[in-house]
Amino acid sequence: MVYQACADRYEKMPYFRVGKSGLKLPAISLGLWHNFGEVDRYEDAKAILHRAFDLGITHFDLANNYGPPRGAAEELFGKVLKKDFAPYRDEMIISTKAGFYMWPGPYGDGGSRKYLIASLDQSLKRLGLDYVDIFYHHRPDPDTPLEETMLALDQIVRQGKALYIGLSNYNAEQTEEAIKILQELGTPLLIHQPSYSMFNRWIEDGLLDVLERYGVGVIAYSPLAQGLLTDRYLEGIPEDSRAAKEHGFLKKEKITPEVLTKVRKLNDIAKERGQTLAQMALAWVLRGGRVTSVLVGASKVSQIEENVRAVENLEFSDEELAKIDAILNE
């Protein structure tokens, strides 16, 4: 059956401007970090992608190493893009990254011009695209001069292989230095992708201020703390959860009784707001307008449907925010 996108897909999702740019992103974006590798079922992954787009999610976030194995998520997305999403390419923002280990030898990791340009060329082949909308350097590389990495990103935009550039996992000082280099080169930094959630607030110690000062957008990954900020772990570790998968990033030992107590208390506040814990956690990351979009993952269609409903209540009272802070600081 030929896929046809829902006619009303833009009616409920809010779209927020990325920093000072002309680009907008959906409040909720889909990340393909997990559940889109060769170890996962293609039909399930395809159903998640279809439903996401039908619900107004126009931004799909990838990286060269997403899988497993590395490259598998880009290949899968490229397959769905060719078969189903081709008519909608210009309605989508597709991003990818390079910066972590990708292939053997001295040129398969880091931040050199050699690695970044070669990696993006490989990504474009896997995706079946001439260009991506956003290309990120995935993490800072202490062994490569920052000027070389930024020159490579500038070159990638000038070659038409990416429309915009982003950074991920850079701290406040590294980000400010990178922004200044890119300003001189004439290719401004569009967006920063840090980890951020109720349980992981490092970006509040300087990075958010830098990004706001220079008009750079923010898209947060792991806003649900790898699934901890959902109702999945309220009663223990389900067999089909990330914590139960050997190849996953969320380890069982992180789910301590103290953490579960906080999760249950946060869940009570979410219920009072008429939201699930996941919906409240996503809305919390977006509070105050400092974060442009939140990246969610999904292993089933129902999770996407639940997450998207977070946009129905993005407002918090001062009292709610104080209660949440009190629980997190216990």
Image (cartoon, rainbow, N blue to C red):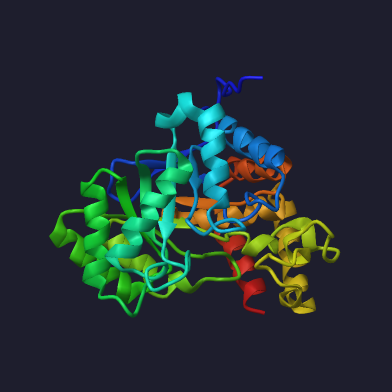
Above or below, 301 relative to 62: above
On the question of residue 316 being in view, the answer is no
Residue nearest the viewer, comparing 218 with 99: 99
Above or below, 279 relative to 167: above
Residue nearest the viewer, comparing 263 with 299: 299
- Dividing the picture into quadrants, the one containing residue 224 is bottom right
Residue at 57% across, 35% down: 80
Residue nearest the viewer, comparing 60 with 10: 60
On the question of residue 93 being in view, the answer is yes
- Dividing the picture into quadrants, the one containing residue 248 is bottom right
Residue nearest the viewer, comparing 292 with 41: 41
Residue at 51% across, 31% down: 82
Q: Quadrant of the N terminus?
A: top right
Horizontally, residue 70 falls left or right of residue 251, namely: left
> Measured from the top left, where is residue 172 in percent x and y?
35, 73
Label total for image: 0
Horizontally, residue 84 falls left or right of residue 112, namely: right
Horizontally, residue 110 falls left or right of residue 47, namely: left
Q: Quadrant of the C terminus?
A: bottom right
Residue at 77% across, 57% down: 231
Residue at 63% across, 73% down: 328
> Measured from the top left, where is residue 277 in percent x and y?
70, 55
> Measured from the top left, where is residue 68 in percent x and y?
62, 58
> Measured from the top left, where is residue 30 in percent x and y?
55, 46
Horizontally, residue 197 falls left or right of residue 126, namely: right
Above or below, 35 relative to 254: above
Above or below, 165 relative to 47: below
Give the residue furthest to the front. 105
